Image: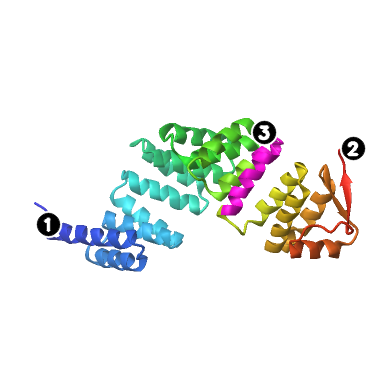
Amino acid sequence: MTSTGQVGSEDLVRRAVAAFNSGDHAQAMALCELGLKRHPGDAALCHLLAAVSFAKADLPAARARIEASLAARPDNVAALILAGRIARAEGRFEAALQVLDRAASQSSRVEIHLERARIFDQAGDATAAEAAWTRVLQGDPKSVEAMARLGRLAWQRSAPAEAEGFLERAVAGGGHPAQWFDLGLVRQDMRRFEAAAEAYRHVLAMSPDAAEAAVNLGVVLQETGDLDAAMAAYSQAYRLSPSTFGIIAMALTSAPSGGLWLDEDALRRLLARGASAPGAEPLAVDARR
């Protein structure tokens, strides 16, 4: 027979979950706290209150509540995964891995491997991260996050063709600006400048204030010899972030074709206007001869 107390607790959990899922964290927290006054130490309520505190970035409260939940139900896989996430957010990587190992001993849920991969990434262990992300992708072949991270890691270990393959899969469904940006970097390193330009244009279409993408677009367009389009991209970057001026000036003088401005202020004015370069101001340089 179900007790009245259990019924009351379950009802509060349902209401709190509904409030949390609707984004009303304050109501979810109030319901959890009310429930814990009536049912001290209730594992489900402690778990939910930990999730609410974590969403609010209150890590000490989240940690205390998830530990209370695990004290009542030490083998609850969902609670162990949340404990791992909280520990990772606090930078306690070893503790995070330990609780996730406990979860993995009871379940093969892909979330466990996903969280382990994020921990290794955050800890800067590229070898372990790559192995972990590979396992995530094996468990979930459609994981865009795993494809993107494997692409980035492959690029960092100087395997651009492999990196491009992963990143192209990651952006196939539309992609995130950061994934298109990484694809641009990979293609730029491979000297596939037109393809890199396509990737950087995707970044700017999705995130118009991405000054770094605009600078890189200018660089690759300059490498193709299209100085007018490169100047338009540099102008966009400068207007978004004047701090890019030094990089732009260096790029203009170091690429195979570009320009040397004897008057720095004139170049600043040109970039600010977003106009094509007047023939009398720059000294054109072609380093390919």
The residue beneath circle 3 is 158
Q: Are marks 1 and 2 in contact (CB under 8 Å)?
A: no
Q: Which residues are magenta?
A: 186-205
Residue 220 placed where, x, y %? 72, 44
Horizontal arrangement in the rendering, residue 84 relative to residue 213 (left or right): left
Q: CA distance from mark 1 to mark 3?
A: 62 Å
Amino acid type at mark 3: Ser
Residue type, numbered disc 2:
Arg
Q: CA distance from mark 3 to mark 2?
A: 30 Å
- Residue 255: x percent and y percent? 81, 44
Q: Quadrant of residue 279?
A: bottom right
Between residues 206 and 159, which one lies in front from this camera angle?
206
Residue at the disc numbered 1: 3
Of discs 1 and 2, which sits in the foreground? Answer: 2
Q: In this image, 81 relative to 73: left or right?
A: right
Amino acid type shown at disc 1: Ser
- Measure the alpha-carbon separation of dots 1 and 2: 88 Å
Q: Are marks 3 and 2 in contact (CB under 8 Å)?
A: no
Residue located beneath label 2 in the image: 289
Q: What label does residue 228 carry, if any?
A: none
| Relative depth, front residue between 167 and 75 | 167
